[in-house]
Image (cartoon, coloured by chain):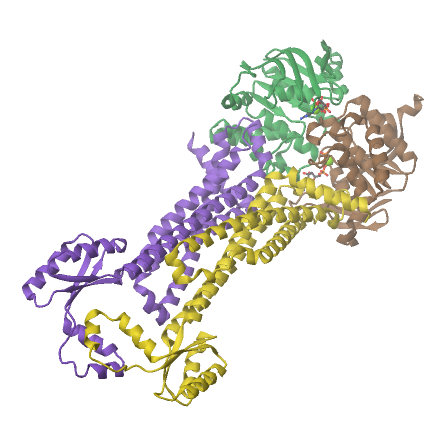
Chain colours: A yellow, B brown, C green, D purple
């Protein structure tokens, strides 16, 4: 194909965006909306995942160690626990500290009661956090089998709940995203089909004067691609605003901040490149394929 | 060359539009096709263009056997034929210039050739002033002439014109048939459907009369213009 | 009655299609409109139908002053006129029967009347066999005749026909003009655009010749059929 | 208008659904999808709201009463508390019960410690639940001012968090639903416009032969309405399946059951009538208006 022909076909694609501006706008809106819906859902899922991981990281097992094993043995035991594959961090929590904290939490009546207890009845403990909370139970058993460990109290029930919440959330979000993708494909295919349907006569005439399918399809392809890219750009802007809006709500609301931890939300800047790339590619591919596949339906004359 | 061998066409609605038609139009021929409304003239043209397929029989056009022609080869066939459709079939979103130029772009003609050829052909049909208009901005006769210009522009081997003067006043009609005649004299085969018997009588030549799907008459008659020494 | 007073039409593209046209067609008249391609004949018709508005001057049709006619009253105007459009304008999703019946449904005609009137009008134009066909399944001439049937069906005060025989063979053309003539004799005004001078010469009557947007000639001539005692 | 004309117009509307089946299918899909998205979001919101209310209902204030006020005065006090406007339930929790429960929760070491404490150091309390958790702080003060009340411990911080979670969730869901409605209106208007655009010539021709706008619009109106109703039916079925699917996940997963309480999810049967009515009405209105408004754009000839 000559350069002039290529230029012509690209030019036709661009012109027909304006010529069929009503339909182009429809496609634009629909690709925009599709990208937004799917994109937002993915972003929400990523952040939910991170929040739950954050909560997981904070949940810890309390390892009670035997009385009076001495500082050396205690340090060695800490090393042994740290060596276990699923253990993330190990922190020593002396019985004095524990006693102090316990008294602080007690009501006045209870504190009165302990006024006469001269000895600290609490044991030394290690606070252990794990890498994978779903293996918490196994890890607890492994720690329990070590020498000089008295008992392990792990939040296995909480861990189970957290894991099942996470699993269910991921299943739901995956379903939502999959459903949204299907929905968007349906909408996009219907819109591009309708948009091309209004031009079916034009396509037929081109065939009757000897145009090949490729020759007819290229302008549609380019038209769809350009509309898709514009839609991606608009979607990107909207996503940025929406995302940062929600991010700031969380940032400014202290009570939520304390539960979820703002550190657990990704700032938009961190994901900008990935989001941009996905949007542009998805927009261009959806637009180009949607339109040219729809055009193909009318090429069989 | 166009050759019909025992060709029948039955539309899905059950109408027998053509019935065992045998016809041979040699390269360089000029033939008028006449016949009453609904006789099957346009059906004949649709067959040649492979817009529809023959229910029976074989159609050969410019060396292509249409019943065996693969889908991908249809554009190649159509590029050897220039057609004036009865309903014009102009692309509504393109100007007159673009409608005509499109046929050349399809065959990847050089940009320079397009720039010189298209205005020339448009002037042949007298539409210099309308090159930038869209089809909806043209009168019926003007649209018909754009369709004619489009059929001529890529110098096809075969020109088929379905009532190319149906919306054109007599003076211009004679000019247009003259134009087709002169193109024919340069070696292009021309097949022209018309119901204007005046024209046929005036120019003479081969007359194919179709009646209810069968060829009723296929002979060469002398035109009055030769007698009168135009 | 149709009355044009100093009517000019300039299309947005800058083309002056009509230029200070004065014209009066009285109730019961029969007039042929002739003129070369692009002269402004169809523009005249578009004005009468209020498809476009005059740039200057006033158009009166069947008692409506079109420049003052409110949007909501346009259907009332159009119901008094039957039009054969040059490009037919049949509704592609309706059968021949439905296309014709539609005009009666619009005026809320009794179902019984529709059932008897529509087949009668379709038979007048010789399309009894095609009543159940869709426009795309018809030949050019057949479509044109459906358009004619549609124009006749609701007994309008004024019938306008834009090249109603452009796609129809001579024999049938004469029949169709005969049909319009006989309708005219019952009191309907008929305005027929044509480029077939044979027809005009044969039937005679009032001839309005438009040339480049102005009326070049507007007289009554005798038809040959009367002389020859048809 | 004659009955025969009305029949004709309705018939035309029905026929044109089949005649333009590609476009009808597009509208069908899009209305279906719109109803589904908005409907599901509303259902999720309603249930989230109910779950949070459930949690609210379970959070209670502990009212410590003065020692030895006698059973009569205690009953009177309960009446007084119950009389407060925001109080939902008041339950007496004797010190013996409290002591038993406290000992049960203690570790062995702690229990050892209390072995020698012969007297129950805990006070009698009332457990008070409130109607509106956001007014918990006010209610606490009101109770505190009553005679014979020693102190009120209310989970005001928890209440605040819950209220702000609820508020943020409602804001987010309202935004999501509003955005979805906008999105759906955009999609629907584009689809119906495209669907009618392909028939603009037909509409023009009708006008040229003298049809009034109403006469042309009625079949479009009916066509849109019928398609909308069909879409609503399909949406209803899909909603039922999806809803009951999620409902059953919650019902079968015991750990989630215990957190959220399955009682807090509405079973679908309870909402069937409302959902059906909303879907059918929304579908019919959307379809009918969308299509006939789009048709109006081509009526000005
Ligand atoms: N697509 C179609 N489906 C069914 N029948 C058709 C179709 N096209 C044409 N016909 C019928 O076939 C017959 C021949 O049609 P054709 O268009 O070939 O006539 P024609 O000779 O061109 O007539 P005209 O001079 O009026 O254009 C007619 O009776 C017509 O009704
Ligand atoms: N919509 C339009 N916009 C711009 N110019 C137009 C439009 N319609 C017609 N014209 C121009 O106005 C002039 C008159 O057109 P009109 O259709 O009235 O001609 P006509 O007499 O009917 O010709 P024909 O016999 O070819 O049908 C022509 O030059 C045409 O190009
Ligand atoms: Mg024909
Ligand atoms: Mg005209």
Residue C116 lies left or right of residue D130; in this view the side is right
Q: Position of residue C222 (x, y in %)?
A: 73, 10
The image quarter containing residue D100 is bottom left
Q: Position of residue C25 (x, y in %)?
A: 63, 12
Q: Is residue B166 above or below residue A84?
A: above
Identify which residue, B134 or C14, lies in the foreground: C14
Q: Is residue A39 above or below residue A86?
A: above
Identify which residue, D213 or A24, lies in the foreground: A24
In this rendering, does residue D41 appear at all? yes
Identify which residue, A27 or A274, lies in the foreground: A274
Q: Residue at x 72, y 48 (%)?
A: A218
Q: Residue at x 41, y 82 (%)?
A: A140
Residue D241 lies left or right of residue D193; in this view the side is left
Q: Residue at x 61, y 22 (%)?
A: C52
Ligand 2 picture quarter: top right
The image quarter containing residue D244 is bottom left
Q: Position of residue C56 (x, y in %)?
A: 63, 14
Assign the N terminus of chain C to one quadrant of the image. Answer: top right
How many numbered callouts?
0
In this rendering, does residue D266 appear at all? no
Assign the C terminus of chain C to one quadrant of the image. Answer: top right
Residue A254 lies left or right of residue B33; in this view the side is left
Q: Is residue C10 above or below residue B136?
A: above
Q: Position of residue C184 (x, y in %)?
A: 62, 16
Identify which residue, B7 or B106, lies in the foreground: B106
């Amino acid at each position: 194909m000559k350069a002039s022909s290529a230029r012509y076909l690209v030019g036709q694609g661009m012109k027909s965006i304006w010529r069929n501006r009503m339909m182009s706008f429809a496609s634009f809106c629909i690709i925009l909306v599709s990208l937004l819906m799917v994109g937002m859902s993915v972003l929400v899922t990523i952040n939910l995942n991170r929040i739950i991981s954050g909560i997981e990281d904070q949940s810890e097992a309390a390892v009670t160690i035997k009385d009076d094993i001495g500082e050396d043995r205690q340090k060695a035991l800490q090393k042994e626990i740290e060596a276990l594959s699923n253990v993330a961090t190990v922190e020593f929590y002396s019985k004095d500290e524990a006693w102090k904290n316990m008294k602080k939490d007690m009501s006045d009546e209870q504190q009165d009661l302990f006024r006469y207890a001269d000895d600290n009845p609490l044991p030394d403990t290690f606070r252990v956090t794990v890498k994978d909370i779903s293996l918490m139970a196994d890890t607890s058993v492994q720690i329990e089998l070590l020498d000089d460990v008295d008992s392990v109290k792990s939040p296995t029930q909480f861990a189970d709940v957290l894991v099942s919440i996470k699993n269910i959330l991921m299943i739901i979000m995956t379903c939502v995203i999959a459903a949204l993708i299907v929905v968007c494909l349906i909408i996009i295919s219907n819109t591009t089909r309708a948009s091309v349907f209004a031009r079916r006569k034009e396509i037929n005439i081109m065939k009757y004067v000897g145009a090949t399918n490729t020759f007819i399809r290229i302008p549609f392809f380019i038209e769809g691609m350009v509309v898709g890219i514009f839609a991606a750009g608009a979607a990107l802007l909207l996503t940025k605003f929406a995302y940062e809006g929600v991010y700031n709500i969380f940032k400014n609301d202290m009570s939520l901040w304390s539960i979820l931890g703002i550190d657990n939300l990704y700032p938009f800047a961190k994901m900008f490149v990935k989001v941009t790339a996905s949007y542009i590619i998805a927009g261009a591919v959806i637009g180009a394929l949607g339109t040219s596949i729809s055009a193909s339906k009318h090429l069989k004359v | 060359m166009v050759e019909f061998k025992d060709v029948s066409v039955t539309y899905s609605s059950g109408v027998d539009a053509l019935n065992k038609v045998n016809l041979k139009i040699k390269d360089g021929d000029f033939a008028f096709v006449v016949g009453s409304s609904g006789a099957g003239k346009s059906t004949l043209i649709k067959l040649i263009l492979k817009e529809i397929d023959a229910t029976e029989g074989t159609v050969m056009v410019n060396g292509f056997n249409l019943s065996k022609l693969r889908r991908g080869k249809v554009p190649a066939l159509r590029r050897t034929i220039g057609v004036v459709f009865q309903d014009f079939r102009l692309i509504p979103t393109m100007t007159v210039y673009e409608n005509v130029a499109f046929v050349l772009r399809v065959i990847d003609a050089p940009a320079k050739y397009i720039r010189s050829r298209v205005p020339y052909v448009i002037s042949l049909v007298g539409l210099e002033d309308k090159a930038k208009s869209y089809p909806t901005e043209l009168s019926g006769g003007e649209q018909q002439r754009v369709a004619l210009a489009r059929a001529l522009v890529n110098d096809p081997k075969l020109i088929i014109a379905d009532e190319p003067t149906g919306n054109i006043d007599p003076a211009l009609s004679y000019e247009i048939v003259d134009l087709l005649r002169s193109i024919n004299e340069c070696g292009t085969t021309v097949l022209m459907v018309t119901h204007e018997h005046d024209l046929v009588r005036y120019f003479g030549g081969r007359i194919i009369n179709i009646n209810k799907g069968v060829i009723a008459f296929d002979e060469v008659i002398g035109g009055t213009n030769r007698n009168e020494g135009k």
